[in-house]
């Protein structure tokens, strides 16, 4: 054997003359083999600045002395020496700034070698449970723009069966505080914990898409108006005539609708809805509701949502119903409530602002004032073959509105003569 089996280092022969030549060549080859970097794998000719010890991977059509394609050519003693790589040999490629691994007879970038490890740690030790462990201030997962890929990026968590869990746990001091997980029965839940031991479901989503709030949803105290308030009791909607947008959802101050027309598009079906007025509004639209509402409540609120205030609803001529005033026409059972509201009847048309049409209704007011500046016969509310109960606490009727409260009941008349449901009011 005249050379070593792996690095092809020349070996001394018995009684060899000029042994120093062979030894020096072996030392130079060994030094070159242990320098785990190459300048390039794409240059087909040695560059003019090639220096002693520089190494190159010979590409197709490359010419580096007698070095063949795929071999490492090293400039030693003014000539190009060829070294054949072994499977698994790894070098750093300077001009591409990446590691290359010799695999299946070719040089491949580090991620193409299809290597497999039982565990891997970055800046920390992995163990048998956490086979991948990373300590870093940030972790970035980006779409593939090298291959390139589809442009999408997805993180998949695959569990064995419906009896297992696929989830993400947020910890504090290695103690769980928030869990997002796919649990049994294909339900997805977001849960919180004060101690890492007992978790409470905050949001649960079934595989049918229905959402529940097992722990309830609290609103700021000023918006409660009753113990244990929140979305578990009613939906909140916001109307802001100054900064609202009728294409918005109406579900928050920043998503407030701007007009009555916009409000009509976001009213829920069958639920209790509280509409917060963030400014004085003009009601110049006839809204006809053929579906029931558990309750529809209007409240005045400061523009920042911090306190209840009094707001004005100015009833104008209906844009969508010429000759009539704007208002609500209720064709299904609905309970109405107005809190901290001034109603100004400023319409030249007719029709009640609140009209119960062949249904069962209930009207409650608290801290409300009614005035009239319009020339028409529009009044506050009225029924048509309906059963309407009403309750009023601190309702102030200006002299201008006398006789324009309940449809068909004149000034000073007994409202109980006009419908079958009693009222705590004795005269309008």
Image: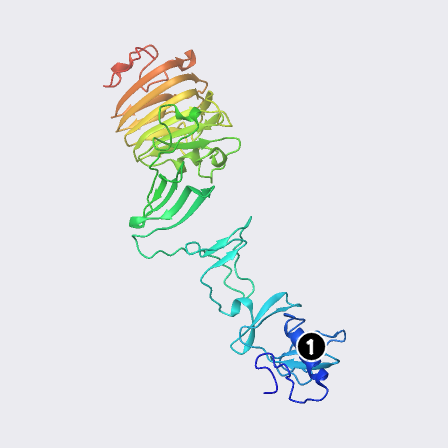
| Residue 210 falls in image quadrant | top left
Give the x, y percent position of residue 272: 34, 31
Which residue position is annotated with label 1?
28
Q: Residue at x 35, y 28 (%)?
A: 296
Residue 398 visible in the picture:
yes
Residue 116, image x, y percentages:
46, 66
**Tag 1's secondary structure?**
helix
Q: Position of residue 6 (x, y in %)?
A: 57, 79
Name the one closer to the observer, 49 or 124.
Answer: 124
Looking at the image, residue 93 sits to the left or right of residue 49; the answer is left
Residue 349 in view here: no
Depth check: 226 or 317 in front? Answer: 226
Q: Quadrant of residue 344?
A: top left
287 is higher (above) or lower (below) than 421: below
Relative height, residue 261 to residue 412 (above, below): below
Quarter placement of the N terminus: bottom right
For residue 237, which quarter of the picture?
A: top left
The image shows residue 140, relative to residue 411, as above or below, that is below
User: Of 348 and 417, which appears nearest the observer?
Assistant: 417
Q: Residue at x 46, y 31 (%)?
A: 239
- Looking at the image, residue 206 lies above or below residue 108: above
Rendered-image quadrant of the C terminus: top left
Judging depth in this view, the residue of 170 and 419 nearest the camera is 170
Most extreme residue toward the front is 15
Q: Position of residue 256 (x, y in %)?
A: 47, 34
Q: Residue furthest left?
A: 420
Question: At 42% from the left edge and 16% from the top edge, which residue is drawn?
Answer: 369
């Amino acid at each position: 054997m005249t050379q070593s089996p792996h690095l092809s280092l020349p070996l001394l022969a018995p009684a060899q003359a000029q042994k120093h030549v062979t030894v020096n060549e072996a030392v130079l080859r060994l030094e070159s083999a242990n320098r785990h970097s190459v300048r390039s794998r794409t240059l087909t000719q040695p560059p003019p600045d090639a220096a002693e010890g520089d190494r190159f991977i010979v590409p197709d059509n490359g010419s580096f002395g007698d070095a063949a394609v795929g071999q490492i050519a090293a400039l030693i003693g003014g000539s190009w020496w060829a070294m054949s790589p072994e499977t698994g040999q790894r070098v750093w490629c300077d001009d591409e700034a990446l590691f290359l691994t010799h695999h299946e007879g070719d040089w491949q970038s580090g991620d193409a070698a299809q290597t497999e490890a039982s565990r891997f740690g970055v800046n920390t030790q992995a163990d048998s449970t956490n086979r991948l462990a990373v300590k870093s201030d940030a972790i970035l997962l980006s779409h593939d723009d090298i291959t390139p890929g589809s442009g999408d990026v997805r993180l998949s968590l695959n569990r064995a069966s419906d009896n297992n869990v696929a989830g993400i746990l947020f910890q504090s001091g290695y103690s769980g505080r928030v869990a997002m997980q796919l649990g049994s029965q294909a339900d997805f839940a977001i849960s919180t914990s004060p101690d890492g031991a007992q978790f409470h479901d905050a949001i649960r989503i079934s595989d049918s898409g229905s959402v529940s709030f097992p722990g309830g949803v609290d609103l700021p105290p000023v918006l409660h108006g009753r113990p244990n308030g929140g979305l578990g009791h009613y939906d909140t909607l916001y109307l802001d005539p100054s900064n609202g947008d009728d294409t918005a959802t109406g579900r928050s101050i920043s998503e407030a609708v701007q007009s009555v027309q916009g409000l009509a598009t976001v009213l829920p079906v069958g639920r209790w809805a509280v509409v917060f007025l963030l400014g004085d509004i003009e009601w110049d639209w006839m809204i006809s509701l053929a579906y029931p509402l558990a309750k529809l409540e209007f409240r005045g609120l400061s523009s920042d949502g911090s306190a209840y205030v009094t707001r004005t609803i100015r009833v104008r001529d209906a844009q969508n119903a010429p000759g009539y005033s704007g208002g609500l026409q209720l064709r299904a059972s609905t309970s109405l409530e107005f809190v901290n509201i001034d109603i100004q009847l400023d319409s030249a048309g007719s029709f009640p602002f609140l009209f119960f049409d062949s249904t069962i209704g209930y009207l409650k007011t608290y801290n409300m004032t009614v005035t009239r500046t319009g020339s028409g016969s529009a009044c506050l509310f009225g029924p048509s073959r309906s059963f309407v109960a009403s309750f009023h606490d601190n309702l102030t009727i200006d002299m201008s509105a006398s006789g324009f409260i309940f449809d068909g009941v004149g000034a000073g008349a007994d409202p109980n003569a006009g419908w079958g449901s009693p009222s705590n009011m004795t005269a309008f």
